[in-house]
Image (spheres, rainbow, N blue to C red):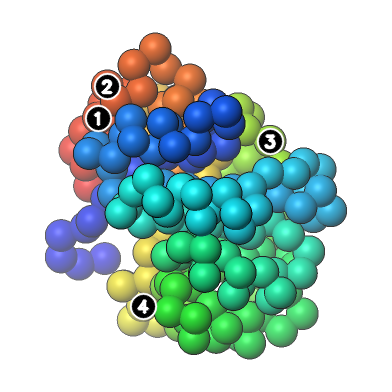
Amino acid sequence: MSGKRNIQLAPSLLGADFADLGGAVRLLDHVVDTFHVDVMDGHFVPNLTMGPMVVRALRSHTRATLDVHLMVTDPDRWIEPYREAGADWISVHYETCNHLERTMSLIRDSGARAGLALNPASFPGGLEYILADGDFVLVMSVNPGFGGQSFLPASLDKARALRSRLDEHGLETVQLEIDGGVDLGNVADCVRAGIDVLVAGSSVYGAKDPRAAARKLLEKARAAA
């Protein structure tokens, strides 16, 4: 990696009060530039969360980036609805895509930034052939489906390997994002492993003072860059 890194914190709305998602966004709107929206379909993961109407409602509360993570079995059919609802970034799981290059192209053609998400056990061979078709790679540091899980340390090894592979192929502008169990105890290690975008749910919205928690995470992360 070269040049100054743009380290970002993306609070996960999965950790917020679902009865007041607008308030959760407004609470941190002047602290962060990005909010992470986990979309679960009850098939790929055993839970149901936010549909396009929720994203549309969130869009009316903030100008910040809405980072929509599609944990769904048929991502292609949902790209356009979420983009039209206000998604700025859309990530899809490698494990759900039969024609990954086409799916990434659909996202980019919609005008959104395209992300490739990887489950903890996934590090597919030949990944370098698709990396240039995306804007970021999302490393899952927990098994997807539920918030509040413990961070899986092996995710740092995967992040380092991905960062090395990206740099080897001249893809320094492709960002690495990590999602799951990120807190003050591991945020610096994440950044040192090559992570640029840190998704944090419980450690932010579960804190007594979410604003202070977000600021502390950002401060520690940027100090490690």
Residue at the spot of label 3? 146
Residue 92, image x and y in percent? 62, 66
Residue type marked 4? Leu
Q: Amino acid at mark 1?
A: Arg
- In this rendering, would 155 be left or right of 88? right
Determine which residue is flagged by label 4.
171
- Percent position (x, y) of residue 60? 40, 51
Label 3 element class: loop
Q: Is residue 97 visible?
A: yes
In the image, residue 123 sits, relative to residue 181, either above or below, namely below
**The furthest residue to the top:** 208
Instruction: Please report the residue visible at 52 percent of the width from the left and 63 percent of the height from the top.
Output: 85
| Residue 148 pos. (x, y %) | 60, 27
Height in image: 40 above or below 99?
above
Q: Is residue 112 left or right of residue 62?
A: right
How would you rate the neighbour count of disc 4 (Cα within 10 Å): few for under 14, some for 14-19, many for 20 or more? Answer: some
Q: Secondary structure at mark 4?
A: loop
Q: Residue at x 57, y 49 (%)?
A: 54
Q: Earlier in the sequence, mark 3 or mark 1?
A: 3
